[in-house]
Image (cartoon, rainbow, N blue to C red):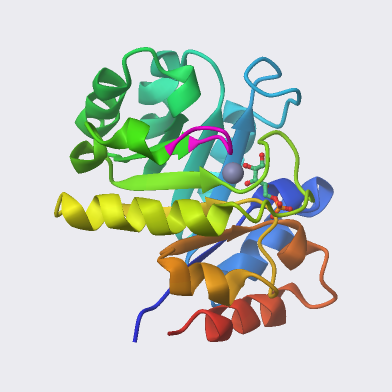
Amino acid sequence: MANTIIAPSLLAADFANLQRDIEMINNSDADWFHIDVMDGVFVPNISFGMPVIKAIAKHAKKTLDVHLMIVEPDRYIKAFADLGCDILTVHYEACTHLHRSLQAIKAEGMQAGVALNPHTNISLLEDTIQDIDMVCLMSVNPGFGGQSFIENTYDKVKQLRKLIDSKGAATKIEIDGGVTDKNARQLAEAGADVLVAGSHVFKASSPSETIVRLKELTAL
Ligand code: DX5
Ligand code: ZN
């Protein structure tokens, strides 16, 4: 039975009760913490930076999956490694020398992810897929939580699955944005390995039961 990884996004947590929300994830069926870093340049919003991630890392007991929505991510790779991040994802659209950035992330002992904006074609990864541990398909335009899911994502998951299989790569497929109990199963069936969920989890009356439900829905 395929086990889909569920990664709640802390962007939707209550920042005044961050430790409480982190403990909720520690004690839940969730697999990873998804951490969104926005710089106000690559995306039209600013989230949080190093001091907050340091505080998160102190309490979080699961994989730290860090999604950089920033320009010039190379400048900060070592800093994120030093904070204890496990997976570091950079945007395809923000990297002039993507291959070099991927090698730099791995050299720091982290897994290397590449995120694609909704308009960015899967075929652009043909020459790098074997070097990528995870591709994050944005199913909304990055920058904000709580947006609606872009339906074209299902086709992109299938195309990406084909590319990964054709190259014999072990790359994981992550979906980020607008994930709910309405699309989770279809995404898992299309070939997604990791589902990020922000608002759907944290705005629910019971976040931990919502996580259980997502795990059940995506167990194929
Ligand atoms: C969007 C972020 C997402 C966001 C998802 O720019 O990358 O990770 O937190 O939030 P929801 O699940 O609310 O769409
Ligand atoms: Zn994200």
Name the residue: 27% across, 50% down.
Answer: 163
Q: Which residues are magenta?
A: 116-121
Residue 180 to residue 49: above or below: below
Query: Magenta part mainly helix, strand or loop?
Result: loop
Q: Is residue 218 above or below residue 152?
A: below
Query: Residue 82: horizontal and vertical position, in percent?
Result: 38, 31
Residue at image location 25% in from the left, 40% down from the top: 129
Q: Position of residue 170 (x, y in %)?
A: 21, 55
Which quarter of the figure is the C terminus placed in? bottom left
Specify the quarter for ligand 2.
top right
Please name the residue shown 68% across and 31% down the image.
48
Residue 33 visible somewhere in the drawing = no
Number of marks:
0
Q: Position of residue 213 (x, y in %)?
A: 64, 83
Residue under the point 52% across and 67% down: 187
Q: On the picture, is 148 further left or further right than 98?
A: right
User: Which is nearer the eye, 66 or 170?
Assistant: 170
- Seen from the viewer's position, the closer of residues 96 and 26 is 96
Decide whether residue 129 is among the magenta residues: no
Left or right: 54 as drawn, with respect to 202: left
